Structure formats: C-alpha cells, structure tokens
Image (cartoon, rainbow, N blue to C red):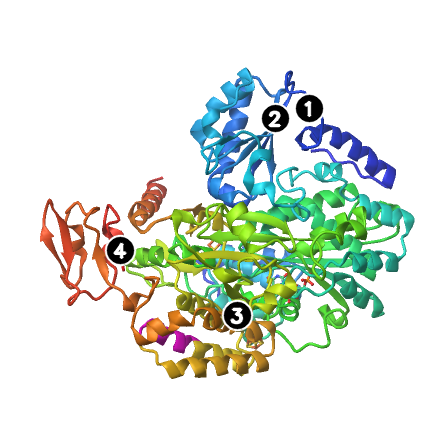
Amino acid sequence: MELKHISDLNQLKEIKDQSYSEINMRLKESDRNLNEIKEYQVLICSGTGCTASKSQIILKKLNQEIQKRNLINKVKVYKTGCFGFCKLGPIIVVHPERIFYCEVSEEDIDEIVDKHFCQNEVVERLLYKGDDKQVKKTIDELDFFNDQQRIALRNCGVINPEDINEYIAMDGYLMLATILEEKRDRNTIINELLNSGLRGRGGGGFPTGKKWEYALSYENDEKFVVCNADEGDPGAFMDRSILEGDPHSVIEAMTIAGYTIGASKGFVYVRAEYPIAVERLRIAINQAKELGLLGQNILNSGFNFELDIRLGAGAFVCGEETALLQSVMGMRGEPRPRPPFPAKVGLWEKPTLNNNVETYANVPIILKNGADWYNKIGTENSKGTKVFALAGQVINTGLIEVPMGTTLRTIVYNIGGGIDNQRELKAVQTGGPSGGCIPVSLIDTPIDFESLSEIGSMMGSGGLIVMDETDCMVDIARFYLEFAQDESCGKCVPCRIGTKRLLEMLTKITEGKGKEEDLKIMEELCYDIKESSLCGLGQTAPNPILSTLKYFKDEYLAHINEHKCPAGVCNALLQVVISDEKCIACGICARVCPVSAITGERKKPPYEIHQDICIKCGACIPKCPTDAIYKR
Amino acid sequence: MDIYIDKTEEENFKKLDEILETHGHDQGHLITILRDAQEVFGYLPEKVQSYLSLKLDIPISTVNGVVSFYSLFSQEKKGRFTIGVCLGTACYVKGAKDVLNAIKEELGLDSGETTLDHLFTLKDTRCIGACGLAPVVMINDDVHGKVTPSDIPSLLHQYIKKSKEEQDD
Ligand SMILES: Cc1cc2nc3c(=O)[nH]c(=O)nc-3n(C[C@H](O)[C@H](O)[C@H](O)COP(=O)(O)O)c2cc1C
Ligand code: SF4
Ligand code: FES
C-alpha cells in the first residue's frame, strides 16, 4: 500500500472522498443496484475467534481461487474486525448484497466462488438459520444485531483494520485534523466530553472529561497519555476486539488526548497474550506516522505526539492503573496507594492520563457527532453504549454492544438467543472477578453503572457470563477466589492472606466438609478484606462470594448440610457413572481404572462402576470413545 | 564479575547483545528485553538474568523480582510444545477443567510441568479471547476450540507426529 504524507485537513478530506467511494458499498445506508453487480467486496472476519476457526486459511484459499478464475478485478477480499457472532465463525460477508455466510470452511470456497461470483447465486446452505428454521440471507436480517447499537464497534466488520485509508473513509482522523487546524481551545474539548456524560469503560466508571480536566490542570514540562489494554477479566475480549478491528480509533483518541492535556508521548499497554491485536496496532501506528497523523509536527500544526506499545507479561494486577504504570516503566507491577492519582503523579512522577481502550474508542465519534448526540443514548447517569463479551451457556456467544439501560433479558434472550441445550437460566455474572452473580429473578434490571452496583455486582470491563442449572454457584465463587488469590501481588496482608483463607473455606464447602458457622465467618472476613486492602483487586475480590451468599445461600447449605452439589459440579460430592444408552461395552474404562472399580462383560453393555471402590479420579471419563461416562 | 559463556552458548548470547542494542540498554525496557531473551533461550536461566543485570546495571534481585513476578516468564526449560488450557470463566463453565484433567491424565503431568522428553509443557492460561469457541486449548500458536476430553488423545497425537516429522527432516 502506498501512503502519501499529508500536511493539512484538506488533503485528509481528499483521501476520505477517494476511499469512501471505494468502500461505500459496504454501508447499510448506501444505494445499491443489485441487478447488475460489477464488483463484489468480500469481508472475512479476522478477529481472534474466527482466526482460531481458520479464517486466515480461508482468506488465502479465496484469493487463490479468485486468481485462478481471473476474477481479480471483479472480486476483492478484505480482512475485517469481529462481527460479534463468534459462535458461528468463520464469518464472511459479501457486499453489495450484504450476504452473511457462517461456519464457512476451506472446502466451501470453490462453491462460493463458482456460484456466487460467477453465476450471481447465493450459496443457500451456508446461510444462517434462525430458531424458527428461517434462512437469513443478509446480515441485516439477523436477530442478533436487532437490539444492538454499535458505536465503539462502529468500524468492526466494516473496514479493514490494516488499511488507514479505510478508517479515514469513515471520518477517521477528521476530528484530530479539525482540532489541530482550528487550534481548538482545550477546554472546549473537555467540556464536550463532560457534557457527553462519557464514563470510563475500564470498570470504575469515572467521568472521562473530569479525568482529562485534572490531567490538564497539573502544570508540568512533560506529561503522558496511557491506554489500558491489559484486559484482565478472565472471560472478556472487548478491548481486544476493538484493537483488532479498529486500532486507529484508539490512536486518534490518544493523540487528541495528548493535544488536550499537553502531552507529547503516549503508551498503549497491551497483554502479550493478544498477538493479533499487538500486530494490528503496530501496523496502524506505522501507517499513521507515514501519513503524518502521528509523530513530529502533526499536519504542520507544530504539535508532536509519539506512541509506543508496551507489552504486559501476564499479571492481572497490572490492569490496576498504578501497577500498570510501574509495569510500563519495566518494574514489578505492584500497586501503590492513591491519591496521588496518576493524573497528578504518574509515569516518571509526571502527570499521566490513563483511559481504557473502549473509552478512547468512543472519543472521536463523540467529538464528531457532539455531546448532545451521545447523551441522548443510555440512562440518566450512564450515557452511551457498552460492549460486552457474551459467553457461557448462551446460544449466541460473541461480542455485543448495547445502549446502557438494556435489560439482561434482552441480552440473554433476544441477542443471545437463549440458553444452550434448552436448560434453565440460573444467573448472569458481570464484572469478572470483581463482580457478582445476578440471579434470574433480577433479569429485568436495566443495566448501567448504578443499577449493577445496587444489586451487588458491577459493570466491570464487560465480561458477561451466562450460567444455567448445571453451574454450581459455590464452585463459581471458588473459581473467582482462586483467580484473585493467584493474582494477588502480595503487597498487602488482607488481600494476600485473606483471599487464601477464603479460598480454603470455599474449598472445604465444595468438598462437603464445611460447617454452617463458616458462612458467617466467611462473610465477616469478606468485609474486612474489602475495607483494608490497598488496591481494587483486594477490595473487590470478595464480591463473588458476597453476591452468591446473598442470592444462592441454599446452594451453600446443600453442600454443607446435605453433602450435595445440586448442579452436579463439585467432584467430591459426586458419583462417576456410566450411561446405559451410550455404553458400547468396549471395556476400555475397566482397563484404565486404577482401582478396578469397573466391571462388565465385553460386547454386553452396560459396564458398571462400583461406587464403594471408585476414587472419583475421573481417569475413565476421557478414555470412553462414546463419552458415556459422566459425573452426577 | 565475569560470566563464563560456553562455546555452545555464544551464538545465543550474541543475539542477546543485539537485543540489548536495539533497546539502547534502557532499563525501562527490561520487560521487553526479557521477553525477547526468552524467545532466544526458550526460558530465562540464571545465567541470562545475571548477564542482563550486569549489562543493564540493575541489581540481580531486581531482575529476578521482575522475572518471578510475571507469569509469562519461565525460569525452567520448556517443552517443544506448550499446551495452554484456557481456564477463563467462559471456558471454565463449559467444562475446561475436564479437558485439563484429560490432558494431565494422558501426559502424566501437572500444570506447569514438562514431559521428560521435553515435548510438552502443560499450563493453564487465562482468557485468550476466543470465548465463543469455549472450551479452548492453545498449543503453541494454534488455537483449538470446542474441545472435549475425548478429543485429547488424537489432538496430542497430531503434535507428536509433527515433532517426529521435524526430526526426520
Ligand atoms: C485489579 C484491577 C484490574 C483492572 N483491570 C483493568 C483492565 O484490564 N482494563 C482497564 O481498562 N482497566 C482496568 N482496571 C481499572 C483501571 O485501574 C483504571 O481505572 C482504568 O484503566 C481507567 O480507565 P477508564 O477511566 O477509561 O475506565 C483494573 C482495576 C483493578 C483494581
Ligand atoms: S490488594 Fe492485593 S493486589 Fe492490591 S496491592 Fe494489596 S496484595 Fe496487591
Ligand atoms: S475464557 Fe477461554 S477463551 Fe475466553
């Protein structure tokens, strides 16, 4: 790709007009003549989910077939960011008709090329079929997208993240260029953000405009802008998808932030576990530099802004902002007390503005469309939209973005398509290890920062895990405590020792060795840890216990008093059994059992496990060729 | 203090010098340097840590403090393939524990251990961002989605075969 250095707003607009005409056919609102298609544009999801399901192999194959059939001028193939419908990946969308193909495999490519591109016929069998068995031809017919509003994800699935011109086509860098051209007053920018009501998407929900205002107010010869892309919540991938699908939106926002607070250097702190995101970010930074939208003397304005990437090295606590700053400087990521806040004392003791990826991704479009456009979306105190990673026992797992105030019911049933395997919804977990489990009785709560805290959970960064009757709430609490305990940096005692004690008590309960008095002690300890821990990790680590104790106490009592795990999860309280129907009497299980607890006769199903001998090691389960052995 | 570098290690240490050069011997880049060093050596033995301490003029305790703090760094030699079983929330509720147990059983390993032939290292990892495909297992850079315990033997076999082919080449 050839990139020309540009030096003012007009030249940017020229690129915009040119690229817009090229990608215009991908936009829903554009006019299209479907009778006579001269050119196809094929978008292949290249997010992590679809890449895992081999979308890059498909991309290669598609290009080969197109070349072979001499269709290079007629069919163009592009990478794009996550469409959100990860469950059905790899996903391919064909424009101008907006045809949505899912679960495409390498073997399907021939047919797509022959039928669709040569004969202009849709390949019916690769279309999505909804619950009602109705075939959905275009992306606009999918229920999955109906209740969504994509603002932070506006460009994901539309543009090629590795081509800066496509970002510019969607009005990218327009705000940065306009601000620099006008030499816009810094307070005007801050006021716009304040009026928009945008709050931090990293979990805390602090008003973004306020944070920028503080960072501006501390005079210093050097300041920094940081982007928190550490995304530690162990079931979430919102920030990752934004970086993979629209890295320039973050770069543009950080550059605007640099101009606003008076910083000329920025860092993006990304998890090393996100190689695709890092690579896209790197490409984007280089392209922005080449065009003159980043680096020295941006668009001849005299404003300089350099951006660097720093990789995290696998420590959850580094998502906490003071720890993150330590890590950016190459040290152990241990938190320190706040205040002073980073806006006053940050990197190398200088004022440092730190925001989350999704927060930044919202900034350019808010500035472009205006605060009054943004603050009409959402609820009274939580404006705009929120991206969630929808996962767990829900049919449509994936990435979604909904206006604040959407209910969990809408998310789980309308967007998520309900619960997998026709089971019953039990709870929804939000806020990751700092959050809580929301019971099905509260599923009509409109979600925003306040409402989630009121019911004992929190917004967090956006992980949303759906749980059904087969999930044990005590075990889930134990899972999160194990995580917190493992990730505690160990600097302060309540968190280091306290979470360990909590984990021991929970483990005892899941093994059927708990006592009812333990619950009281555990609850007290939870509050002590919350009050006396140094950083957010310790302060929120007990939340999963407190919320499950509040809403699912009966499950704790079942483990304690009846020595039963109602959901059938906790190993020590279960039996390993063989399903009569599935057993084919091959005898493999009997051979692997270390204590000879399994007996039976070859070819005469079923085999049987003698519960008095079985030590529940589970060795037989994975060996069974028909998955007939399970725990109950 | 001088560090004795064996002939067989010379090449790797030369690469390490180049890494130090690209990062301008900057202490602030310690984490990046350690990452790159781990790429070269496969892990971060004491000798490499001492070497970096010397070259960057940082106390060895600080270097080791950083190495031991971050889970990405390993002070022990790892296997040819690192198997990462995602124990993120989405994978956990979709049965990742059973998958992990199946691998433990198959290889006779615990998390964090390496097989004697240095073929496999087993690890549990956090969410790798493919929750839609849960449960997920990562083997080196390959992501395998919707894995069940009964898939494990054939999955591992693919890699055993791969390593045999490499040796034959
Ligand atoms: C233990 C812990 C982990 C955190 N992890 C993240 C994270 O992964 N990403 C993030 O943006 N913020 C995380 N935060 C919140 C940050 O400290 C900080 O509030 C946030 O980055 C500020 O950006 P915002 O105002 O745009 O939300 C974490 C906080 C704590 C206490
Ligand atoms: S609360 Fe936990 S993670 Fe935070 S500083 Fe204390 S020990 Fe470290
Ligand atoms: S929880 Fe396993 S990939 Fe996200």
Residue at left offset 65%, top offset 18%: A38
Could you tell me the amino acid type at mark 2? Glu
3 vs 1, front mark: 1
Residues packed near mark 3 inside 10 Å, few (<14), some (14 to 19) or many (20 plus):
some
Q: Is mark 3 within 8 Å of ligand 2?
A: no
Q: State the residue position of label 2.
A: A97
Q: CA distance from mark 3 to mark 1?
A: 56 Å
Residues packed near mark 2 inside 10 Å, few (<14), some (14 to 19) or many (20 plus):
many
Q: Which mark is residue A345?
A: none
Residue at left offset 52%, top offset 36%: A91
For disc 1, the chain is A
Vertical comparison of A22 with A430: above or below: above
Q: Which mark is residue A32?
A: 1
Instruction: Residue A193: name its quadrant.
Output: bottom right
Could you tell me the amino acid type at mark 3? Phe
Upstream in sequence: badge 2 or badge 1: 1
Q: CA distance from mark 2 to mark 3?
A: 52 Å
Residue in front for this viewpoint, A49 or A198:
A198
For disc 2, the chain is A
- The answer to whether dots 3 and 4 both sit on one chain is no
Q: Which mark is residue B69?
A: 3
Give the residues in magenta.
Answer: A503-512
Is label 4 in a helix, a strand or a loop? strand
Q: CA distance from mark 3 to mark 4?
A: 38 Å
Is label 2 in a helix, a strand or a loop? loop
Q: State the residue position of label 4.
A: A630
- The answer to whether dots 3 and 1 both sit on one chain is no
In magenta segment, residue B9: no
Residue at left offset 32%, top offset 72%: A511
Residue in front for this viewpoint, A604 or A363:
A604
3 vs 4, front mark: 4
Q: Position of residue A111 (x, y in %)?
A: 47, 22
